[in-house]
Image (cartoon, grey):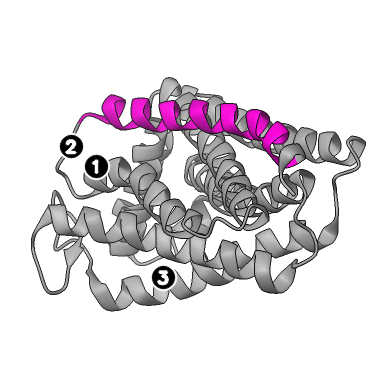
Amino acid sequence: MIEAHRRQMSEQYRKRLGGGQMTPALSGLVLQIIVYVLVFGGLLVWVVRNKWFSWQPFGSGILVFVVFVLILEQIVHSLMIAPPAGEGSFPHLRWSDSPLLYALYGAFMAGVFEEGGRIIAFFLLIPRRHKYGDGFVYGLGHGGAELLLIGLVSAINALVLIMTVSSEGAQPILQNIPADQLKIIEQSARTIQETPFFMFIIGLLERFAALFIQIALSLFVLLGIRQKRYLVFPAAILLHALVDFMPALYQAGIIRNIWIVEGVVWIFGILALGFVFGSRRLFQAAP
C-alpha cells in the first residue's frame, strides 16, 4: 500500500516536472552551462593569444580560491553561523540574532579571506610575476574557479536533479529512497523547475559580474604592490566587503527585492570591467 502510494506520488511529480520534456527551467540551465563554458574558454583563448597566460598565476588563483574560500572561510562560517531554524527563517550568527550583524560579518569575512589570499599569493606564490597580464590571469584563475565550481557545478547538479526526477526510467531507483528524503528531493526539483527563465539569465549576469570583479580586485592589489602603496590592502578588503554587503543583506532577509541586489552587483561589475581595461595604462606607467 505504501509502495503504491509512493509510486503514485513519484508519477505525479514526474508529470508536474514536465515528464522529461524541455521546459523554461531546463532551457535556462542548459543555456547557463553552455555560456559558462564558452565565456570562460573564450577568455582563456584571449589571454593565450595576448601571451599573458602562465600556469603559475592561473594556478595560484585557483589554489587561493579553493583553500581560502572553499575550505578556510567555510570552517570559520561553521563556527560562527547558525543555520536557518526552519522554513521562512534566515541564517544568523551563533552569538547574535541581528540580521545586520550577520550581513556585516559575511561581507567582511569574504573580503578578509579572498583579499588576504590574494595578497599572500602575490608575495609568496608569484613574487616575480607582477605585470598586468599576470594580475589578469590570476584573477581569471580565481574568478574562473568561482564561476565553474559554483556556477557551472550548481547548474549541472540542478539539471541532473530535475532530469532524474522527471525521467520515467529513474522511477525504480527513486522508489528505493526513503519517503521523507524522496519528498525533499522532489520538492527541490519542483522549486528549480518552477523558476522563471529570466532568473537563469540573471544568474548568468551575476556570475560574470563576479568574475570581472575578481579580475579587477586582483589588478587593484597587484598595482598597489607595484607602486608600493600598501594602503591598497585594507582598501581591497573594504571594497570586497562593500561588493558583498548587498547580497549579504538579501541573505539575512533585510532586503527582499532581488532586483535591488542584482542592480548593485551589476553596477559593481560594470565599474570593475572599466577598471580591468583602464588599469592597463597604470601598469605601464608604474615602476
The quarter of the image holding the N terminus is bottom left
Q: Residue at x 27, y 27 (%)?
A: 260
Q: Are marks 1 and 2 in contact (CB under 8 Å)?
A: yes
- Amino acid residing under circle 1: Tyr
Using a 10 Å C-alpha cutoff, classify the residue at mark 1 as few (fewer than 14 neighbours), some (14 to 19) or many (20 or more). Answer: some
Is residue 268 located in the magenta-colored stretch of the structure?
yes
Q: Residue at x 35, y 29 (%)?
A: 264
Mark 3 vs mark 2, CA separation in Å:
24 Å
Residue, disc 1: 250
Mark 1 vs mark 2, CA separation in Å:
5 Å
Q: Which span of residues is magenta-colored?
A: 257-283
What is the secondary structure assignment of the residue under circle 3?
helix
Residue 84 or residue 92, whichever sits in front: 92
Which image quarter: residue 79? bottom left
Is residue 191 located in the magenta-colored stretch of the structure?
no
Does residue 206 appear left or right of residue 169 in this picture? left
Using a 10 Å C-alpha cutoff, classify the residue at mark 3 as few (fewer than 14 neighbours), some (14 to 19) or many (20 or more). Answer: some
Does residue 145 appear left or right of residue 127 in this picture? left
What is the secondary structure assignment of the residue under circle 2?
loop
Does residue 8 appear left or right of residue 115 in this picture? left
Residue, disc 2: 255
